[in-house]
Image (cartoon, rainbow, N blue to C red):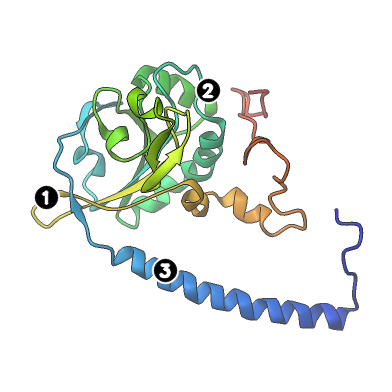
Amino acid sequence: MPANHAVVSSEEWLQARLRLLAKEKEFTRLRDELSAARRDLPWKLVEKDYVFDGPNGKETLADLFEGRSQLIVYHFMFAPDWDDGCKSCSWWADSFDRNVVHLTHRDVTLVAISRAPFETLEAFKKRMGWTFKWLSSGGNDFNYDFQASFRPEARATGEVIYNFRPHKTSMSDLPGVSVFCRGADGTVLHSYSCYARGIDMMNAGYHYLDLVPKGRDEDGLPYNMAWVRERDKYGSPGGA
């Protein structure tokens, strides 16, 4: 904890809190405006016929809506040659897993998609105790087309396109969220994608950390979330 942090009287604390409250209210208004602008983005027709391996066998992107008009895809980092899924993505999954059922009541289906084989995804999902639907895109270009995976020839240059701009990385996969909707004629439309810090808003844990005196407390770590540990099959933090 900071050694010289200000400690004040109740009245001084209240005045400081009211000043911050004014900023919080302004931020809420700005966030509402940003959310509206996000919804107002133009849509793009999805022209490829992506087919995924899932619990119901082969499923198209249109099938994943499950009769609803809106679809959220979490791009979970899990390459075909990995033994375990990304531990940071696992934290994100802990955050959204139990929200899936609530989203259905707002005409939204949420799934995760990774390049690892479906059997590998199912085994990891069982180990972690998750219930969300998880599909494999290992047989199609979905992850590459939506900037969540990068081909070897692109990585060999040391720079890929991620978050809509050049990005230096040696990673084969990175996280993201993509949103789709169904047109009146049944077509699938891409409405939004976000990556990197853009997916912070989908992680409830980070928002709680932002409330406490130490905050996210990630300064000095080799990378953000280096502290995250996967839960083992018993629900306890493991050593991964």
State if disc 2 and disc 3 touch (CB < 8 Å).
Answer: no
Q: Earlier in the sequence, mark 3 or mark 2?
A: 3
Residue depth check, mark 1 versus mark 2: number of the one nearer the observer = 1
Quadrant housing residue 131 = top left
Q: Which residue is mark 2?
A: 127
Along the line of sight, the residue nearer the viewer: 10 or 42: 42
What residue type is disc 2 on? Arg
Residue depth check, mark 3 versus mark 1: number of the one nearer the observer = 3
- Whole-percent x and y of residue 42? 23, 62
Q: Is residue 175 visible?
A: no
Distance of mark 3 from mark 1, alpha carbons?
Answer: 28 Å
Crowd class of label 2 (few under 14; some 14 to 19; many from 20; radius 10 Å): some
Crowd class of label 3 (few under 14; some 14 to 19; many from 20; radius 10 Å): few
Vertical side of 235 occupied by 219: above or below? below
Q: Is residue 111 visible?
A: yes
Q: Which residue is mark 1?
A: 186
What residue type is disc 3 on? Leu
* SS for dot 2: helix
Q: In the image, is 185 to the left or to the right of 130?
A: left
The residue sitting at 65% across, 54% down in the picture is 208
Q: Earlier in the sequence, mark 1 or mark 2?
A: 2
* SS for dot 3: helix
* SS for dot 1: loop
Q: Which residue is mark 3?
A: 34
Distance of mark 3 from mark 2, alpha carbons?
Answer: 38 Å
Distance of mark 1 from mark 2, alpha carbons?
Answer: 36 Å
The residue sitting at 21% across, 57% down in the picture is 43
The residue sitting at 49% across, 76% down in the picture is 29
The residue sitting at 66% across, 77% down in the picture is 21
Q: Earlier in the sequence, mark 3 or mark 1?
A: 3
Q: In the image, is 60 to the left or to the right of 214?
A: left
What residue type is disc 1 on? Gly
